Structures are given as structure tokens and as C-alpha cells.
Image (cartoon, rainbow, N blue to C red):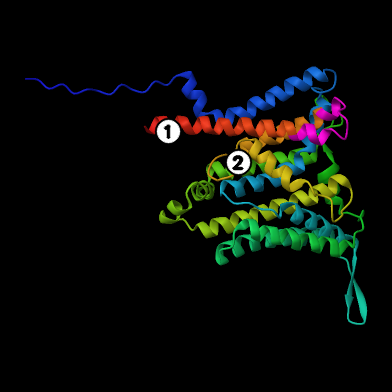
């Protein structure tokens, strides 16, 4: 008597299954293509021109630098509410140290004015210190990052307002003017050239991508965000990883704040009020999960382009200024809903594979 053993059939790898597995990454890209198509039809003579594309990239460049840090924070499953405030404070401190500021001292005052390089580096160091403080207080004391960074947001806002007394500072360091408003490679498709701020944003995004995909530190970020307990059992010092990521977020927020000062040509205490929500929205729009472990810089790039195309396209089609926030909110909400359903399809595909 012979005994036959049933051999399980290999699972079919059809197109639908492939699409479900990659739905989280494809959905934002499809949303971007649809938006480009819509605005190309509504504004055919202006939207796809080299000058307008340059404007879109330049408009999201400052946000891209900050969003690189936000991406790492969200991959950990954490949140940083202080990025915009730290960015504002960094720009203010760099400008005031370069311009010269009066400090009360006993019965008199002293005027503090330092060379440009020191002003920029000191302000940048301050941003890193504030980022480290966020991570250390959260990991060592055990406070949720939402609460810690909310407090840091108030601290940074208060310091910026105290230093400026509500005034606008225009004497900004020349190096920030060059980075924020200068041009490189004049001529060609982009007319006057490529804004240096775009090149800076591309470099920052590229470095962030390499760190997340090609280094052990990047793998530890994904592991810590995907399953913190399992990462700790594997021997990963998750507290150190969290502190390091918050330090990087502070560094990039400070850099974004100084780039914004250079782009606008002024520093003030309320210069970046929208950066926080815009950065988080752009990262999430690209498909990075708020719960950690899923996403990356490529997703963030797509989210940034969605953000830029929406803002630029609404300007080109001359949507009423009072309706623009409403229309923009509806489009962003629709894009987020599509992303959520795409993530659910991906989860169902993973569950089918493990069944």
C-alpha cells in the first residue's frame, strides 16, 4: 500500500496581489499624478512650465528639510510638536547674534555681536540641544513625547518672542541669504537657474534616505518603531535611538529655520506657524504611518510634491483666497482617506500571506 503526500500548491502571485502589497506606496503616487493631470488641464499654459516647476520645488524645500526629521520621528511611532518653534528660534538667534543684540547686565547693558560663522553655528547647536532635551526627558523620565515636545514648543516660542520683542529683524547673515535665495546653474530649463535651496533640500533628503536604508542606525529606527519591546529584547538600546532621532530632528528643524530666514530675508517670532502641521501632513500623505515602522523618505518626497502641487495649482487657477484653505483641506483629507484604505489593503495582503 502506497502512501501519497499532498504537496501544497504555491500561492499565486497575481497582479491584484502585487497591487495590494504595494498599495501603501502606490496610492500617494497615483494621487500626485491625478493632481498633476487636473492642474495641467485647468492651467495648461503655466502649470508644467520649467519656471513653475522650479517654484513648486522651491516652495516645499524648507518643508522638505524639516520633514526629513519628522519622517524619522514618525517611523519611531513618536511625535515632535516643537519642530516649527525650534526652527523659528534658530533663525531668530542666528540673526540677532549676527546683527548685535543688547543684553541687560546689572546697572548697565552690553551689546553682543559675533562673527557670522559663530552666530550660525551657535544657533544650530541650540536647536540640537533642544532636540536632545526632548529625547532625553522622554526616555529617561518616561513622559510621552507629545507632552514633552508640547512643553518645548512653548519654551522655544517664548524665547523667540522674548529675544525679538515682537519686532522683525532684517540684518540676516549673508550665508543664509545665499542658501535661501541664491541661484546655481543659470540658464536652461529653469531660466534664472536652480535655487540653491532646492539643491540643499535634495541633499538633505538623499542623506536621510541613505541613513534609513543603508545604515544599521536606520534599521534600528524601523525596528524600534515597528515593535519597541522586540527591539529591546534583540539588544537594541531604544532609548539611545529615540534620543538620537530627536537630536537629528532638532538639527534639521534648526537648519530649516535658518533656510527660511534666508528665503524670506527676515527673522521674526511668528515666521513658521504652519510648518508643524504641514510637515506632519506631508509625511503622512506620502504613506508613512503615524504608528511607526512603515514609510520612508521616498514616501515623504511624494507627500511633499502633493503638498506643493496643491498649493501651487490652487494659485494658478485663481481659487478665491477665502476658499483656498477649505479646498486645500478637502483635497488633503481625500488624499489621506485614500492612503488609509491603501494601507488596509496592504495589511489584508500580509494577512493572506501569513494564513
For the point 89% across and 51% down, which residue is it? 266
In three-dimensional space, the C-alpha distance between marks 2 and 1, rounded to whole angstroms, equals 28 Å
| Magenta part of the chain | 314-329
Q: Which residue is mark 1?
A: 351
Q: Depth check: 50 or 83 in front? A: 83
Q: Position of residue 274 (x, y in %)?
A: 78, 46
Position of residue 148 measured from the top left corner of the image (x, y, whole percent): 65, 61
Residue at image position (51%, 26%) is 20
* Residue linked to disc 2: 209
Question: In the displayed structure, does residue 24 sit left or right of residue 65?
Answer: left
Asked if residue 64 shows in the view, the reply is: yes
Closest to the observer, 273 or 172: 273
Q: Percent position (x, y) of residue 86?
A: 74, 56
Q: Is residue 344 above or below residue 211?
A: above
Q: Is 153 positioned to the left or the right of 22 in the image?
A: right
Residue 254 on the magenta span? no
Amino acid at each position: 500500500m502506497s502512501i501519497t503526500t499532498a504537496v501544497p500548491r504555491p500561492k499565486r502571485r497575481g497582479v491584484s496581489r502585487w497591487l495590494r502589497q504595494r498599495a501603501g506606496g502606490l496610492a500617494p503616487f497615483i494621487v500626485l499624478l491625478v493632481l498633476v493631470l487636473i492642474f495641467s488641464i485647468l492651467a495648461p499654459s503655466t502649470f508644467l512650465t520649467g519656471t513653475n516647476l522650479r517654484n513648486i520645488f522651491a516652495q516645499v524645500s524648507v518643508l522638505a528639510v524639516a520633514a526629513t526629521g519628522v519622517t524619522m520621528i514618525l517611523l519611531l511611532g513618536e511625535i515632535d510638536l516643537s519642530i516649527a518653534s525650534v526652527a523659528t528660534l534658530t533663525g531668530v538667534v542666528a540673526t540677532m547674534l549676527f546683527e548685535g543684540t543688547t543684553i541687560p547686565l546689572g546697572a548697565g547693558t552690553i551689546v553682543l555681536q559675533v562673527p557670522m560663522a559663530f552666530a550660525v553655528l551657535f544657533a544650530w547647536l541650540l536647536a540640537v540641544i533642544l532636540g536632545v532635551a526632548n529625547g532625553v526627558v522622554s526616555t529617561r523620565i518616561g513622559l510621552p513625547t507629545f507632552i514633552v515636545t508640547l512643553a518645548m514648543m512653548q519654551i522655544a516660542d517664548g524665547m523667540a518672542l522674548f529675544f525679538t520683542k515682537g519686532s522683525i529683524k532684517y540684518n540676516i547673515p549673508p550665508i543664509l541669504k545665499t542658501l535661501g535665495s541664491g541661484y546655481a546653474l543659470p540658464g536652461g530649463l529653469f531660466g534664472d537657474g536652480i535655487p540653491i535651496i532646492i539643491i540643499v533640500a535634495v541633499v538633505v533628503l538623499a542623506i536621510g534616505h541613505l541613513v534609513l536604508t543603508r545604515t544599521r542606525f536606520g534599521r534600528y529606527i524601523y525596528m524600534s518603531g515597528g515593535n519597541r519591546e522586540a527591539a529591546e529584547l534583540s539588544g537594541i538600546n531604544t532609548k539611545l535611538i529615540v534620543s538620537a532621532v530627536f537630536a537629528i530632528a532638532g538639527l534639521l528643524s534648526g537648519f530649516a529655520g535658518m533656510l527660511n530666514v534666508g528665503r524670506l530675508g527676515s527673522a521674526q517670532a511668528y515666521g513658521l506657524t504652519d510648518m508643524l502641521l504641514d510637515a506632519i501632513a506631508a509625511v503622512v500623505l506620502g504613506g508613512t504611518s503615524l504608528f511607526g515602522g512603515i514609510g520612508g523618505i521616498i514616501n515623504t518626497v511624494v507627500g511633499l510634491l502633493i503638498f506643493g502641487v496643491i498649493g501651487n495649482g490652487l494659485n494658478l487657477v485663481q481659487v478665491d483666497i477665502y476658499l483656498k484653505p477649505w479646498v486645500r483641506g478637502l483635497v488633503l483629507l481625500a488624499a489621506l482617506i485614500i492612503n488609509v484604505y491603501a494601507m488596509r489593503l496592504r495589511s489584508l495582503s500580509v494577512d493572506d500571506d501569513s494564513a
